[in-house]
């Protein structure tokens, strides 16, 4: 990634410090809870983590963990990747920050599954929560990644007809595409709002031993992210309106680096 700050500027160093501090506090509290579970009669486990009411220590840890994720997402989104589209729309920074959060959450899925494998096959003590927690996190990764993909213009597009259109027809097709997204968003929110509200208000759970409120959180989150994707689509339309149209040829699909690597591999084998 490039080291040039995109939007934090002078706040980059304080945000980095906040990220480190809250990560350290969260990790220290996590170790304390583990030690308490091993040696204390009254302890907190993953069951209490999703039911923090009346448990100040758990509430403090969850608050610090949320702050650590927020600062980490802000810090990591302040730099642009080598192949990333730079944020230039009015909504791009929100999508980039949530995209970085999706990347962090993917790493947490790996850690959760690694913990489950070790616990199950090394210590013969499988957990009741690893599968549901990884599924819970993966739902948000999917939603945030969709928003990030919209900001990066990386969804699948077919350019065969689009590239031969005149400028005014391209813009008309872009407007029609965005209007279809807006219409789909309106229909989805209109049809799903009542069900999402009911699930959230009763905090519907998953019905397992750990019983996390996955349906009660994911259904409202789905509608919220769809609205954000719609806003991002409008932002893309406005940001790209006066840009020079890109021309696509079959040569764009050729990866010269990959071809060179294949050639070197064949030469080494011969």
Image (cartoon, helix red, strand yellow):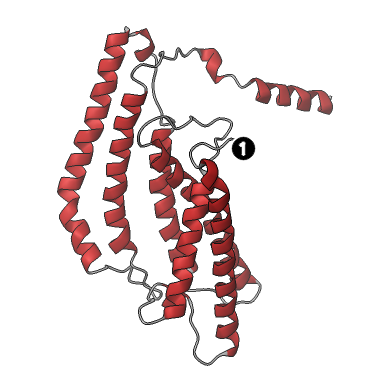
Where is the N terminus found, in terms of image quarters? top right
**90 with respect to 256 (left or right):** left
- Percent x, y for residue 235? 32, 31
Number of numbered discs visible in the structure rendering: 1
Image location (x, y in percent) of residue 62:
45, 69
Position of residue 130 measured from the top left corner of the image (x, y, whole percent):
49, 67
- Residue 254, horizontal then vertical, whole percent: 59, 19
Residue 267: quarter of image: top right
> Is residue 248 positioned above or below 223 on the image?
above
- In the figure, 197 relative to 31: above or below? above
Q: Residue at 39% of width from left, 14% of height from top?
A: 160
**Circle 1 — which element?**
loop
> Can you say which quadrant of the picture contains the C terminus?
top right
Seen as rendered, the residue at the extreme front is 10
Residue under the image location 23 percent in, 30 percent down: 180
Label 1 environment density (alpha carbons within 10 Å; few <14, some 14–19, many ≥20): few
Residue at the location (29% across, 37% down)?
A: 231
Residue 110 seen by the camera: no
Residue 184 appears left or right of 256: left
Quadrant of res 53: bottom left
**Compared with residue 154, is residue 8 higher up or lower down, i.e. above or below?**
below
In this view, the residue in front, 260 or 226, is 226
**In this view of the protein, can residue 51 be seen by the observer?**
yes
> According to the image, label 1 marks what residue?
3
Give the camera-side residue of 160 and 221: 221
The residue at 24%/63% (across/down) is 200
């Amino acid at each position: 990634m490039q080291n040039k700050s995109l939007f934090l500027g002078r706040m980059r160093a304080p945000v980095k410090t906040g990220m480190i501090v809250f990560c350290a506090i969260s990790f220290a509290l996590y170790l304390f809870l583990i030690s308490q579970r091993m040696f204390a009669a009254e302890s907190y486990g993953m069951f209490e983590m999703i039911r923090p009411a009346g448990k100040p220590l758990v509430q403090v840890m969850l608050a610090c963990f949320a702050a650590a994720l927020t600062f980490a997402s802000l810090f990591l989104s302040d730099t642009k990747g080598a192949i990333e589209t730079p944020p230039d729309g009015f909504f791009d920074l929100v999508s980039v920050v949530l995209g970085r959060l999706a990347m962090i959450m993917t790493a947490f899925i790996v850690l959760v599954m690694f913990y489950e494998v070790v616990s199950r096959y090394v210590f013969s003590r499988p957990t009741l929560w690893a599968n549901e927690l990884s599924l819970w996190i993966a739902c948000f990764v999917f939603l945030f990644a969709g928003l990030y993909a919209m900001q990066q213009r990386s969804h699948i597009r077919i350019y065969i007809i689009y590239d031969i259109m005149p400028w005014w027809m391209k813009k008309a097709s872009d407007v029609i595409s965005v209007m279809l997204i807006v219409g789909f968003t309106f229909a989805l929110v209109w049809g799903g709002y009542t069900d999402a509200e009911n699930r959230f208000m009763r905090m519907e759970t998953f019905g397992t031993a750990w019983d996390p409120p996955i349906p009660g959180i994911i259904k409202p989150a789905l509608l919220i992210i769809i609205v954000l994707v719609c806003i991002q689509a409008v932002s893309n339309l406005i940001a790209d309106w006066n840009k020079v149209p890109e021309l696509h040829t079959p040569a764009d699909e050729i990866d010269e680096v990959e071809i060179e690597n294949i050639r070197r591999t064949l030469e080494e084998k011969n």
